[in-house]
Amino acid sequence: MTTAIGMCDDLNKGIIDRFRSLPMARSAVLSGRTLSDVVCNAGVLVVLMVSGVAVGWRVHTSVGEFLAGVGLLLLFIYVMSWVGVFMGLSVPTVEVANQVGFTVVFPLTFLSNVFVPPQTLPTWLRPIAEWNPVSALTASIRQLWGNPNPFTAAGFPAEHPILLTLMWVAVLVAVFAPLGVWRYRAMSR
């Protein structure tokens, strides 16, 4: 949501037009925005982890698995930044960007295994929750950091969450990075 709001705000204030008039690579604006959001969110992740440690959260695996989990989170943040780029360039105002972002984040989060065991959902919602990218990421991080998954189940998403997360990353970046670039290029026409 932060990326979508930031891109829409920059577009409405004319900052994007100023960047486009400078003699620099066209890719610099979008790649700079997505990478800077990863760096910003890495700081947020550090604050969350320190707060978690203060209230009793621990990683129960090796340093390598801890770093792999952090890397997976940052990779997912990068992909979601591309989703935000496309959304931010596709809506007219910051308020709309905020609302659209909320309507994307809300179902992804609440129809996942983050808060509710998928087994407690209605039968028709279970596959959605099990194959949800947020569910895959959550299960991956729980596995990498040795925190037990209270919502284990059978099937590919439960047995291969890291692979599923990487598949979601590949699909989402393959869809939203070109869409974001296309939308950015189409603005000048």
Image (tube, rainbow, N blue to C red):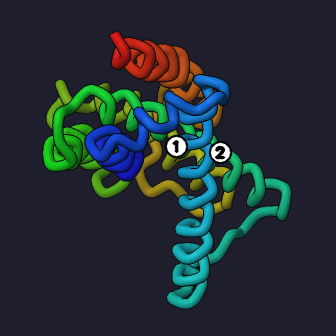
Q: Which residue is labeled 1 in the image?
A: 137
The front one of 49 and 159 is 49
The image quadrant of residue 76 is top right
Residue at horizontal 84 percent and vertical 63 percent from the top:
63
How dense is the environment of label 2, judged by Cα within 10 Å: few (below 14), some, or many (20 and up)? many
Residue at horizontal 42 percent and vertical 16 percent from the top:
179
Give, as a three-letter code, the residue at label 2. Answer: Leu
Tell me the mark number nearer the camera, choosing from 2 and 1.
2
- In the figure, 47 relative to 28: above or below? below
Instruction: Give residue 171's position: percent from left, percent from top.
Output: 52, 18
Residue lying furthest top:
189
Task: Indicate the secondary structure of the residue bearing disc 1.
Answer: helix
Q: In the drawing, what numbered circle is on residue 72? A: 2
Asked if residue 159 can be seen in this view, the reply is: no
Residue at horizontal 62 percent and vertical 33 percent from the top:
28
Considering the image in quadrants, where does the C terminus appear?
top left
- In the figure, 182 relative to 23: above or below? above
Instruction: Give residue 134's position: percent from left, percent from top.
Output: 42, 41
The image quadrant of residue 26 is top right
The front one of 60 and 83 is 83
Task: Indicate the secondary structure of the residue bearing disc 2.
Answer: helix
**CB atoms of marks 2 and 1 within 8 Å:** yes
The front one of 35 and 48 is 35
Asked if residue 132 can be seen in this view, the reply is: yes
Instruction: Give residue 166's position: percent from left, percent from top.
Output: 62, 29
Q: Is residue 14 left or right of residue 170?
A: left
Give, as a three-letter code, the residue at label 1. Answer: Leu
Q: CA distance from mark 2 to mark 1?
A: 8 Å
- In the figure, 182 relative to 1: above or below? above
Between disc 2 and disc 1, whose residue precedes?
Answer: 2
